[in-house]
Amino acid sequence: MRSRAFRQVDVFTDVPYLGNPVAVVLEADGMTEVQMATFARWTNLSETTFVLPPTDDRADYRLRIFTPSGELPFAGHPTLGSCHAWLNAGATPRRRDVVVQECGVGLVEVRRDGGRLAFAAPPRRRTGPLDDALLDRIASGLSLDRAAIRAHAWVDNGPGWCAVLLGSAAEVLAVRGDFGVLGDTKVGVVGPHPGDGPADAPAFEVRAFFPAAPDPDGRVTAGFEDPVTGSLNASVAQWLREEDRAPATYVAAQGTAMGRAGRVHVTDDGERIWVGGDCAVCIAGVVAI
């Protein structure tokens, strides 16, 4: 057992306990994959991350990202929360305003803009429309009429996301997920807010439904709603911008249905889409692993 620096960070909020938490083990060098997976199951958060020395000279650190049921090549809120924890622990990046993270999808740049961090949306691994059978399953699993889905697409940048666009934020908030029907589908649901609010009001409402591990018979009958999801917002932004359904800069709200107040800040600078949010350290200390 070794004492390792630890942070638990709330992401996509400037008010602690209203965003999405991530557990971050700093100084994770020497840990085995089994130890990482065991600790991630123990924290039981949507993601737990482990900060390691980089293997690529261009990176500031390497990150491994685990859910309670397995490892992810990339995830958004763990990227921002881990970067915030790394900086909070006193680390210094090679470049003043950019931190370079090495992870399963390669190198991800995290931009520092005052107190807010933003990552460059990684390329999607799968795009294009969903097939009819999958759309029928999603509609049934979300208690939607098929006609309520205005647009749909694969938006997979690692976790396996697909997404559906509804007519309004109110329709998104009315969705009820049935994981017995959704099975292993990882689905994001998006809908526009009315455009008559204040300038900093959210333009879209987002929800994310994620399956749990299969039961002993290999069936997925349970799952959870993720409070605020960086990877999904990144690929949804790429999709919406391609189809001219979103402005170059906007804010997405997520977690409303769960009593959270997540805010995801999206900016398309013409070359890349940046996905940003505020972070707050809620727990700082050491863990024995």
Image (cartoon, rainbow, N blue to C red):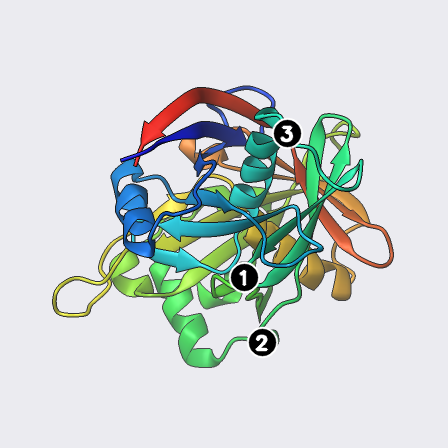
Looking at the image, is mark 2 or mark 3 earlier in the sequence? 2
**Mark 2 belongs to which amino acid?**
Pro
Residue marked by disc 1: 164
Q: Quadrant location of residue 14? A: top right
Residue 106 image point, x, y percent: 61, 62
Tell me the distance, in whole angstroms, between the alpha carbons under discs 2 and 3.
32 Å
In terms of secondary structure, where does tag 1 sit? strand
Three-letter amino acid code at disc 1?
Val
State the residue position of label 2. 129
Query: What's the residue at 75%, 53% (across, down)?
Result: 273
Residue 184 percent across, percent down from the top left: 33, 65
The residue shown at (58%, 33%) is 86
Q: Quadrant of the C terminus?
A: top left
Please tell me which of labels 1 and 2 falls first in the chain. Answer: 2
Q: Residues within 10 Å of mark 1 (few under 14, many from 20)?
A: many
Q: Earlier in the sequence, mark 3 or mark 1?
A: 1
Task: State which mark lies toward you, 2 or 3.
Answer: 3
Q: Identify the residue shown where x is 46% and y is 79%.
A: 132
Q: Check if mark 3's residue and mark 1's residue have beta carbons within 8 Å.
A: no
Q: Residue furthest right?
A: 270
Residue 55 position within the rendered picture, expressed as x and y whole percent measured from the top left:
58, 58
* Vertical placement of residue 199 versus 50, above or below: above
Question: How far is the residue under mark 1 from the one under mark 2?
Answer: 10 Å
Task: Using the image, tell me which numbered label, if any, was put on residue 278.
Answer: 3
Left or right of 94, for residue 204: left
Can you give x and y, in whole percent of width and height, for residue 154 in the image? 56, 70
Tell me the residue at 48%/42% (across/down): 173
